[in-house]
Structure formats: structure tokens, C-alpha cells
Image (cartoon, rainbow, N blue to C red):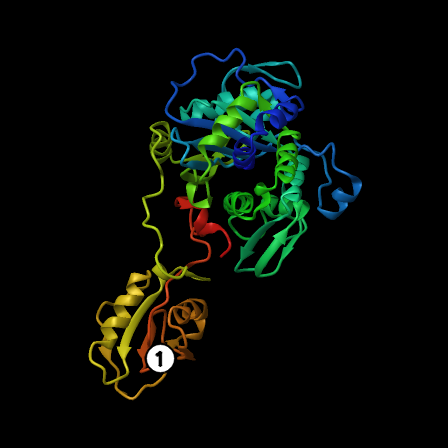
């Protein structure tokens, strides 16, 4: 994605072809499509299989210690994503495939042992170890029935270089993130991550109970932030900086033979107006997070019907996210709770007729689950709007108070899950809010979000 955005400025500056041609010669090429037969029919748009491997041969000893990159590599794919670029070049859809997905690999020759294998069950990330890029592509095509047009492989070193040459990438979190396995240690708030810290962020699996699902969501958020950094920071307005960015990306990845200068330039010219809002992210629908397979143990089983519908949508080159009108007025305030899960009863604490209805309508419009039946409070002389809440529901209460500028938070033990708003004479407006992490970690069926919904405000 960064490569694509970088090419925009290169092409428009008139130096793109010369610069990219010199970089093209340094790309490590692979041929994942050699001798492939009975492939899926081509759809509309372009499908790129983007994989992140655990290759660490070029990592320095200092990097190993600082960023917890020790241990032996498994020579497998840590991250697997399908990036679909629409035919009109107005949209990129990123679908994460869990690395522990249950898969049945086609017959092949083992890369390590030379042994002939028939069709057999496997975790998706192990296809790379058995048969390299070719078997990985064949397995993904077999599972998705999507034709993969291009293959792009990134390792630890190339990832860190790309982030560093961009000057770091900004991420934000409403909760502290700490993982002793990767060394990640972020406090709640906004952070500018360099290459090493960014690698810790996208690798961490032990910061919450969501394991690999949570990690995939952080990877998607990070990719959106990377796009935002490349398109909005002014980095790509400097031809010399662009050369460095393109060199960092193209000079340290593996790609198929057909993913060269001319293709990149064509993409770049067509994606001049690309932004985080132009990208959408999701995870393949999951039916069973702990699907037991003899000889493999616990794997991740896809929801076949929902996954089939998802990939048919990509094949037809249709967006996954519903169309959204452009936001009007001030940007929504991010809150640490989903308004759609917060129940609210509104009461009018003034003598102004209809004030309760105004507050109720405003809160409902920004997503809160109001009763839609505002009442009159016993006291009609309330000056300052009050949010009454049970101390056990403090996070929802803070989210509600953020939507009511100047309101007072007041504990009410025994209030229960439903919050109460008593509107006072100081009420002026309901401020728009939205959950800081709309993807959430509640279950295996993840929603579709656009890049602008997950980047830091």
C-alpha cells in the first residue's frame, strides 16, 4: 500500500520511471504462479496476496535484544492478507486471514525434505514452510476461489525500514497494551512508533483475550495509520524522501515477476486521491475459533457460507462497507465504549417544554440506545446537566458525558446498567461521539471498517 501511494508523487513529478526502474532491479523476485493449473477465473479489479514472514536473518544483535526478536524462525507466514484494489482504483479492501486457519493444501513437493505430499490438512501459515510462496498462493486460491494476481512478501527487516523511513507511524489505544513475549509496553493514549516498536505492536498476541484476532485488528489499524502517514504528512511531496520510501519498500521485499515498474506507475497514476477513507478492512468470518483436528490440534475454522459471500463480493469488485455520507460539522469525539451498547433514560430537569425530547433525539442520533420516551424530572430547577450512573458502569458513563459538553458525572449506586441523563438549563447540544475501536473484540464475526474510522483523531 505504501508503495502504491509513493508512486503517485513519483509519477506526477516526472521522475517515477527512472527512479523505479533502478529500484526494480533490486527487488528479490519469486515465481509463485509457476506451473499452476486449474486456477479460479479472474474477477474484476486486482488481488494481491500480502504476507509477512518471520524472517530475521538480517536483524542485528541489538535489534534482537531491544525488540524481543530472538528465537528460531518457523519459516512460515506470520501475517496473511488479501488486498483487493478496485478496477477504478478508488478503493482498496484488506481481508485478514488468520494464520491458524484450517486449510487443506493441494498435492505438492515439500520444500525442505523433497517428499511428495498428497492433499492433507494443515494450518494456513504452515503452507509457506512446506511449499513456499507457490503453495501459499495455491492454498489461498483453493480456500477463497479468488484468483491472486500478485504476490508481495515482507519480512521483519523490510517492515522496520519502511516505518523508519516514513518517520514513524502514529497509533492510539484507549487501554494500556503490554505483551511480555514481544516487549510491547504502551500506555493508554497516542504514540509515535518507530520501526522496531511498530513491529512489536503488529506482532503482539498476548495483550488481551482475543489472541490472533486482536492482533489482526491491530495490524489493520496500523496499515490504515501507515496510509494516513504516507498521504497526509507531506512526506511524499519531497521527491528525495519519496525515493527513500520507495527504496525502503521495493528494495527489501519479495514480489512476483509481474509486479514491476510499469504496473506500479499505472497504479500510482490512478490512485492520486487515495486516502485512509478509500481503504476498508475486515477479517474473514469465523465459524469455530477452536476447531479440533487430529494431528494438528486447535485450528480456526471459517464460516463457509459467510466467507463465500465475502469473497464473491470481492470477485464482483463491490465494496464491503456500506456507503457513508461525508461527515458534516466537527469530527466525532472518540470514546472508550460503544454508544450502541449504552442504554440511556433522559429526563427534563427544567421548565422548558420539549427539552427532554431534544436531548433524547440528539443522543439517539449519535448512536446511544435511548428509551425514546423522555420523562420529566421531579426537580424542574436543574441548572447543570447531570449523568447519573452506577459505579460499575463508569466507562459508558464517561462516554455519555463526552456527548454532553459541560455535564456533571454523579454516581448513583444501584442505578444498574441503564444510565440516566437529567437535562439542565445549561444544555446546548449533543456532541457526536463514536467508539475508539469500532472493530471491538467481542466475537469472531468482525465488521467492516474504513481506514478513517480506525486511525488516531
Label 1 sits on a secondary structure element that is loop
Residue 441 visible to the viewer: no
Residue under the image location 61 percent in, 27 percent down: 20
Residue 206 screen position, x and y as percent: 59, 49
- Which residue occupies 39% across, 20% down? 42
Nearer to me, 395 or 386: 386
Residue in the foreground of this view, choosing between 334 and 128 = 334
Q: Position of residue 395 (x, y in %)?
A: 45, 67
* Residue 25, placed above or below residue 169: above
Against 346, residue 41 (above or below) is above
Residue lying at the far front in this picture: please name it.
14
| Left or right: 78 as drawn, with respect to 142 | right
Q: Quadrant of residue 39?
A: top left
| Residue plotted at (57% across, 18% down) | 257
Q: Position of residue 414 (x, y in %)?
A: 38, 77
Residue 167 position within the rendered picture, expressed as x and y whole percent measured from the top left: 64, 47
Residue on which the image places disc 1: 385
When asked about the image quadrant of residue 343, the answer is: bottom left
Q: Residues within 10 Å of mark 1 (few under 14, many from 20)?
A: many
Above or below, 200 relative to 335: above
- Is residue 262 visible in this depiction of the protein? yes
Q: Residue furthest right?
A: 61
Amino acid at each position: 500500500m505504501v508503495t502504491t501511494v509513493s508512486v503517485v508523487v513519483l509519477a506526477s513529478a516526472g521522475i517515477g520511471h527512472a527512479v523505479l526502474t533502478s529500484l526494480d532491479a533490486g527487488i528479490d523476485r519469486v515465481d509463485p504462479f509457476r506451473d499452476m493449473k486449474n486456477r479460479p477465473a479472474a474477477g474484476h479489479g486486482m488481488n494481491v496476496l500480502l504476507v509477512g514472514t518471520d524472517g530475521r536473518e538480517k536483524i542485528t544483535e541489538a535489534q534482537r535484544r531491544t525488540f524481543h526478536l530472538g528465537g528460531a524462525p518457523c519459516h512460515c507466514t506470520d501475517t496473511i492478507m488479501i488486498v483487493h484494489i478496485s478496477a477504478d482504483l478508488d478503493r482498496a479492501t484488506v481481508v485478514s486471514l488468520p494464520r491458524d486457519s484450517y486449510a487443506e493444501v493441494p498435492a505438492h513437493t515439500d520444500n525442505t525434505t523433497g517428499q511428495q505430499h498428497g492433499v492433507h490438512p494443515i494450518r494456513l501459515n504452515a503452507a509457506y514452510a512446506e511449499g513456499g510462496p507457490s503453495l501459499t498462493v495455491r492454498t489461498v486460491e483453493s480456500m477463497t476461489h479468488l484468483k491472486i494476481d500478485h504476490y508481495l512478501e515482507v519480512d521483519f527487516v523490510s517492515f522496520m525500514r519502511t516505518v523508519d523511513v516514513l518517520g514513524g507511524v502514529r497509533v492510539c489505544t484507549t487501554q494500556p497494551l503490554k505483551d511480555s513475549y514481544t516487549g510491547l509496553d504502551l500506555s493508554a493514549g497516542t504514540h509515535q512508533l518507530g520501526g522496531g516498536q511498530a513491529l512489536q505492536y503488529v506482532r503482539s498476541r498476548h495483550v488481551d483475550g482475543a489472541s490472533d484476532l486482536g492482533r489482526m485488528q491491530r495490524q489493520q489499524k496500523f496499515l490504515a495509520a501507515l496510509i494516513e502517514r504516507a498521504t497526509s504528512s507531506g512526506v511524499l511531496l519531497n521527491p528525495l524522501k519519496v525515493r527513500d520510501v520507495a527504496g525502503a519498500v521495493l528494495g527489501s521485499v519479495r514480489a512476483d515477476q509481474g509486479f514491476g515498474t510499469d504496473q506500479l506507475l499505472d497504479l500510482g497514476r490512478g490512485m492520486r486521491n487515495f486516502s485512509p477513507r478509500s481503504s476498508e478492512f475486515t477479517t474473514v468470518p469465523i465459524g469455530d475459533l477452536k476447531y479440533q483436528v487430529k494431528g494438528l490440534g486447535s485450528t480456526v475454522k471459517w464460516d463457509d457460507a459467510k466467507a463465500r459471500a465475502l469473497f464473491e463480493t470481492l470477485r464482483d469488485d463491490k465494496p464491503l462497507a456500506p456507503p457513508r455520507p461525508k461527515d458534516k460539522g466537527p469530527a466525532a469525539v472518540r470514546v472508550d465504549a460503544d454508544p450502541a451498547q449504552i442504554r440511556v433514560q433522559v429526563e427534563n430537569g427544567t421548565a422548558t417544554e420539549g427539552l427532554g425530547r431534544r436531548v433524547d433525539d440528539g443522543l439517539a442520533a449519535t448512536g446511544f440506545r435511548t428509551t425514546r420516551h423522555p420523562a420529566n424530572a421531579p426537580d424542574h430547577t436543574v441548572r447543570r446537566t447531570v449523568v447519573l450512573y452506577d459505579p460499575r458502569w463508569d466507562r459508558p458513563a464517561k462516554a455519555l458525558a463526552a456527548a454532553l459538553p459541560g455535564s456533571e458525572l454523579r454516581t448513583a449506586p444501584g442505578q444498574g446498567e441503564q444510565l440516566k441523563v437529567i437535562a439542565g438549563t445549561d444544555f446546548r447540544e449533543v456532541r457526536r461521539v463514536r467508539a475508539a475501536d469500532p472493530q471491538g473484540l467481542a466475537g469472531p464475526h468482525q465488521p467492516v471498517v474504513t481506514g478513517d474510522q480506525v486511525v488516531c483523531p
